[in-house]
Image: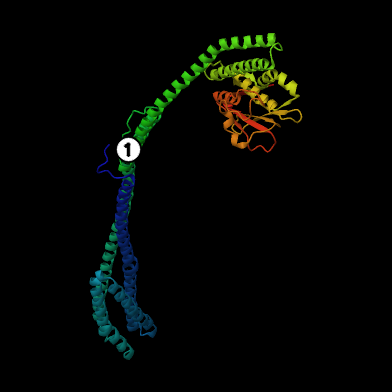
Amino acid sequence: MRRAGRLRVGQRFAVVALILGLVLAAGVIAGVHASRDLADARARLVLRIDPALVTALRLQTSYLDQETGVRGFVLAGDSRFLTPYARGLDDERAAAMRLQELFREDPKLNASSRLLDRTLQLAATWQQGFAEPAIQARRTKPKDDDVNVGAGRARFDRLRRSLAVLQAGLGAARGQARAALNRNADRLNQVLIAVAALLVLGGLMSILFIRQAITVPIAALADEVRRVADGDFEHGVNARGPADVVALAEDVDSMRARIVQELTVTRAVQQDLERSNAELEQFAYVASHDLQEPLRKVASFTQMLQRRYEGQLDEKADQYIFFAVDGAKRMQELINDLLAFSRVGRVTREHQAVPLRSVIDRALTDLAGAIEDTGAQVEVTGELPTLRVDAGLLALVFQNLIGNAVKFHGEDGSPHVSVEVARGEDGSCEIAVHDDGIGIEDEYADRIFIIFQRLHPKERYGGTGIGLAMCRKIIEYHGGAVWLDVDDPRPGTTFRLTLPSELEESPAP
């Protein structure tokens, strides 16, 4: 039996769980990183770059408003054209502050931040070098002859080109951010797919591992144990696999070895017991037969002496002859009972389906004389089924039980005996034989079924002390049980016997 270096079932489960746990943990970590990178890329695109592009467009619009307002005021001299210029200055400051804030939050936009600074400088140069002087000049002069519109347009074009470069940089940054967002989304999907694939693969490998390492060894051990359970006690139980499965196999094999050892002893004892019982039964049978012939002679001649010489000899001689005749009769009765007892289970007849009523009637017919002499009343109640039994042996049971009930009825009144038949919870046939006689003390409940055991002197109540022992032997021969019911509250004696359900057939009509 090999056990060294093997893990137990629980340890193997722990290893499998640890591996799956590590795979799951690695997948979770990778997924968390990919999800975080995806969130960062989305936040950079949505919260910084896209707002920066929108704000750059607002900045461009603010410059266009300023340029349009200055040009309209210079050409027309209408102060209403200065409203877009003033609004453009406010929008420029708000857009510039917002862009500077966004660029500070994203260090990767340093180039755009520098372009913004250059654009603001060019805007300031245009405003201070052209816009403000042109507005002032137009207010003081009715015509724009002295305003250098071409110089202002050149400066604004430089501002426009710088702003276009800033917007182009932000567009490129947006494209890069979208690409990073897509890459991180793809990486997250790949991580999730990889984790799912690893978990499925790990689950399949775990199933195969458990089957090969646990299920197969346990199934093999079960086959080994089943082979022993089927009767092959000489087959050793071996197992391979986890340490505790191997240990279990060793324990089972040790138990098998002990069972084999005890079975060997039991068989030897049983063989000796069977041989002794056979020898005793044979001895009783042979001895009874050998005793029958000389006993018949003794009984016959003593009875002849009694009939011929009774009253011709003295009183003592008559008494001696009476004792001899009575002893011979008792011996014949004892031998006949011993013969009947020894035949139970040894001389077998085929069981036949017979109505229980007919069996009881057969016993009552044999007891007709005793019943008539005592004025006994025998009542049979309940549903009487048909049983597959040895009718002659079962009739002896009722003959003994009812006969004892009639015999031990006491001195007052005629005996009343009831035979009550019912069906047990397991479907068996249950029979109770109750009488209102002298009763039996509870302490003798087991003793009365021992052969030759008597509770009363034979001078008062006749009998050989074999009847109840024969009843138990016959009922057990049929697979049932008989006992004294000490819990019956009714006065008198109640014997209960059962016959198994497999003997029962359809109820008698």
Residue at 26% x, 87% y is 146
As helix, strand or loop, the secondary structure at mark 1 comes to helix
Q: Position of residue 454 (x, y in %)?
A: 60, 28
Q: Position of residue 309 (x, y in %)?
A: 69, 10
Residue 253's place in the image compared with 107, above or below, is above
Q: Nearer the viewer, residue 344 or 74?
A: 344
Q: Position of residue 381 (x, y in %)?
A: 71, 28
Q: Position of residue 502 (x, y in %)?
A: 57, 25
Residue 241, quarter of the rendered image: top left
Q: Nearer the viewer, residue 368 or 394?
A: 368
Residue 340's place in the image compared with 427, above or below, is above
In-image side of 256 versus 310 (left or right) = left
Residue at 29% x, 50% y is 19
In-image side of 426 versus 107 (left or right) = right
Residue at 28% x, 87% y is 133
Residue named by callout 1: 250
Q: Is residue 165 visible?
A: no
Q: Nearer the viewer, residue 105 or 395?
A: 395
Figure coloring: rainbow
Residue 233, quarter of the rendered image: top left
Q: Is residue 321 visible?
A: yes
In-image side of 491 versus 205 (left or right) = right
Residue 437, quarter of the rendered image: top right
The C terminus lies in quadrant = top right
Residue 257's place in the image compared with 9, above or below, is above
Q: Residues within 10 Å of mark 1 (few under 14, many from 20)?
A: some
Amino acid tagged 1? Glu
